[in-house]
Amino acid sequence: MATTSAISNETKLILAAQDSAQAAARSSTSSTSSSSASTANSALSSLAKNYTTFLTLLTTQLQHQDPSSPMSTDSFTTQLAQFTGVEQQVETNEKLSSLISLNESSQLNTASDLVGQTATATTTSLPLQNGSASLSFTGTSGESVAIAVANAAGTIVKNDVVTASSGTNTWTWDGKDNSGNTLANGAYNVAVKTIDSAGTTSDVTFTVNGTITAVTKGDSDMNVEMGSVTVPMTNVSNISSKSSSSSSSSTASSSTSGSSSTTGS
């Protein structure tokens, strides 16, 4: 009975991880990132449009006002003040946009030094680069952890169940699917799950590792590209050169056969 229960829990754990990986794939495909930059440009355009409309209304009003009952001086002064205020706001926004653009260009020049270094980022997208990918998670000794990897179409290409070590664990994937076929480099969706003694599964917080191939300007932040995976700079928790990155020595056991491995420290 104990063996049957263990098998049942492992299957349940794998299925939970697969469901999460497929959900991440669907979310990645359907999501449309909101653009704060386009919102700002839209607001500026709207303000400029209002400025032009206000000017048109003002001149039309002056052309058609009754000479025998002209606009009062107070009203006319108020409208001119409003007109001037809108004009100044448009100019201020344009100058602010220019300053932001200059600042972002400066950041890009500085960030170019990051290319070739290893980044650790919080994302469900796993970058497969040069036939290798890895992620890290914190576990407890003897804890069962399932990792599931799905391609862009949501098809599960790799799953693994490992026994975690206490502390930080690193799972490495050699880019081969469950049948041993070598997959193309690119962005894959990944999920990590664990299960308790009662058979309840839960998410395991993890980070992915990858080599930075480019740094680009996003809508509201700088983006780091690791092959086909793009993540905001704010999601990057660590950047290190390849020479300074090290792997831990103790090895956790994997309960499924394959070419992936897990190390813990």
Image: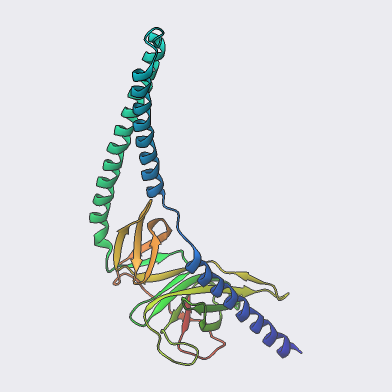
Residue at 54% across, 78% down = 147
Q: Nearer the viewer, residue 253 or 219?
A: 219
Q: Position of residue 34 (x, y in %)?
A: 45, 54
Query: Residue 40: which quarter of the image?
Result: top left
Q: Quadrant of the N terminus?
A: bottom right
Q: Nearer the viewer, residue 136 or 100?
A: 100
| 36 left or right of 3 in image | left
Residue at 55% across, 89% down = 256
* Total numbered badges shown on the rendered structure: 0
| 205 left or right of 232 in image | right
Residue at 40% across, 66% down = 120
Query: Residue 115: which quarter of the image?
Result: bottom left
Q: Position of residue 177 (x, y in %)?
A: 46, 87
**On screen, residue 83 above or below 234:** above
Q: Position of residue 100 (x, y in %)?
A: 30, 44
Q: Nearer the viewer, residue 44 or 224?
A: 44
Question: In the displayed image of the protein, which residue is found farthest to the top?
Answer: 68
Asked if residue 206 can be seen in this view, the reply is no
